[in-house]
Image (cartoon, rainbow, N blue to C red):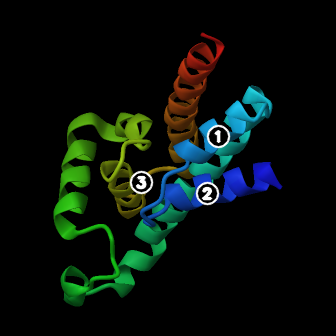
Amino acid sequence: MAYLSLFLTAFAAATVLPLSSEALLLALLQQGFSPALLWLVATIGNTLGSVVNWGMGRYLLHFLDARWQQERWVPIKPAQLETAQRQFQRYGVWSLLFAWLPVVGDALTLAAGILRVNFPVLVTLTAIGKGARYGVLLWLAEKAFTN
């Protein structure tokens, strides 16, 4: 049940919902759960959450019109999306390695959908970035817990 909770939290945290999975990840690590399995579950969940953002950008954005700028329920504002699109124009798909960043990461994956980034490229680069972030976090936590 703990791994499922982590998966769902990591998944939701990568979507446009304002959540974080790091606290649960560290709590489970401290309780003795397998670091490798925690890393895998969190990385897969967080990557799949980014896939949802990509899908929203690719398939759902055309449903949003000028009212989008005024809707409060849309957590990614036009200015954030413009910043992400400029990032893509400047750095290309390699920007997806930073999809783990708070706020801008959601906008990057949404922009990737709008700009029709190839799905395998999205998944690969996003997973590398998110996996590296969780790996570093777990490594640092294990060092802190053993000292």
Q: Amino acid at mark 1?
A: Ala
Calculate the distance from the C-alpha at mark 3 to the C-alpha at mark 2: 18 Å
- Dots 1 and 3: beta carbons under 8 Å? no
Q: Is residue 112 left or right of residue 47?
A: left
**x 19%, y 52%: residue:** 83
Q: Is residue 13 left or right of residue 93?
A: right
**x 65%, y 51%: residue:** 45
- Look at mark 3 in the image and give the residue it sits on: 109
Q: Residues within 10 Å of mark 2 (few under 14, many from 20)?
A: many
> Where's the C terminus, which quadrant?
top right
Residue 9 disc label: 2
Label located before the other in sequence (1 or 2): 2
Residue 27 disc label: 1
Q: Residues within 10 Å of mark 3 (few under 14, many from 20)?
A: many
Q: Nearer the viewer, residue 7 or 115?
A: 7
Q: Is residue 43 at all visible to an observer of this figure?
A: no
| Image location of residue 11, percent across then percent down | 60, 57
Q: Is residue 146 left or right of residue 85?
A: right
Q: Nearer the viewer, residue 25 or 97?
A: 25
Q: Amino acid at mark 3?
A: Thr
Q: Amino acid at mark 2?
A: Thr
